[in-house]
Image: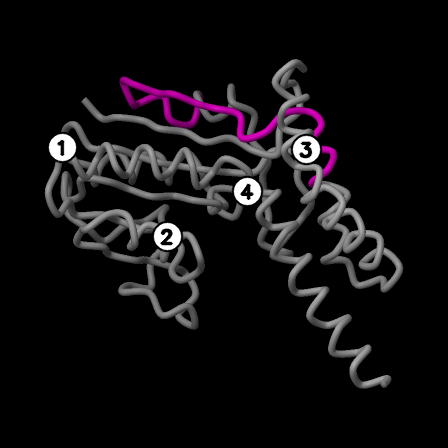
Amino acid sequence: MNKLVRIFIRQLFFITLKASKRLSRNNLESFLMDDLISIAKKNKNPKVLFVGSGGALEEFVKKILECNLVTIDVDHKRKPDYVMSITDLKFEEEEFDLVLLLEVLEHVDQPFNASSEIFRVLKPKGILLLSTPFTFGIHDAPYDFWRFTKYGLKKIFYRFDQLNINERSGFLLTISTLFSRLIICKNPLQRLIGCFFSILFFVLYPLIKTLDNFLPKPITTGYYLKAEKK
């Protein structure tokens, strides 16, 4: 019986962990899907630079966009096409149609250099799609360096002529996400609390999202940015 209980708890943990991650990335996939579909209609088989190899977001992109995808990462264990930093790209100028920098910028030690390099390797009319957390706990320590406001993002990517930034969540969903992400804590009690709130908020998600439409957005889990190089 104890073995069955342990198996149940382990499965419940993984399910709620996944639910908490979906909360933290609220609206990211929908924003991304809309833009990728739009890009696919305008550009057949674009050359794409994906920063940060592996993971669910890379797989998500591959399912939607038929493209020549090149991956880079500073960690060779993630098996990128090239072990390379976004702050010092070894590519020619105007080589890519699209750069994807998703949930990575907070881990980049020199974000202004990253912006310059992205601008350099993008073709004219090239697109940058970026997401980054704002109100969110430290993760991947000690390589979690920054939290950017939308005004900070505008400063960093000032070279781009067209820049659109959207909040990924409102006040209530942000607070819900912070509670649910307790599930990644080492303390067993905190993980249990996070597990409970992950289930609760996932069930109440439609209501929370509806209520957020009537509240201001001074707090958000993160931002989604689309920029175009003229």
Residue segment shown in magenta: 155-177
Query: What's the CA distance linking mark 1 and mark 4?
Result: 27 Å
Instruction: Report the residue at 42% width, 36% height from top.
Output: 30
**Image position of 85 with respect to 146: above or below:** below
Q: Quadrant of residue 168?
A: top right
Q: Is residue 133 left or right of residue 212?
A: left
Mark 1 and mark 2 in contact? Answer it, CB < 8 Å: no
**Residue most extreme to the right:** 189
**Image position of 210 with respect to 130: above or below:** above
Q: Which residue is mark 3?
A: 174
Query: What's the CA distance linking mark 1 and mark 3?
Result: 35 Å
**Image position of 214 with respect to 34: above or below:** above
Instruction: Report the residue at 73% width, 50% height from top.
Output: 199
Is disc 4 surrounded by few (<14), some (14 to 19) or many (20+) residues within 10 Å? some
Assign a secondary structure to mark 2.
helix
Query: What's the CA distance linking mark 2 and mark 3?
Result: 23 Å
Mark 1 or mark 4: which comes first in sequence?
Answer: 4
Mark 1 or mark 2: which comes first in sequence?
Answer: 1
Mark 3 or mark 4: which comes first in sequence?
Answer: 4
Assign a secondary structure to mark 4.
loop
Q: Is residue 100 left or right of residue 39?
A: right
Which of the image's four quarters has the C terminus? top left
Query: What's the CA distance linking mark 3 and mark 4?
Result: 10 Å
Q: For this rendering, which residue is in front, 173 or 156?
A: 173
Q: Which residue is mark 1?
A: 42
Q: Which residue is mark 4?
A: 25
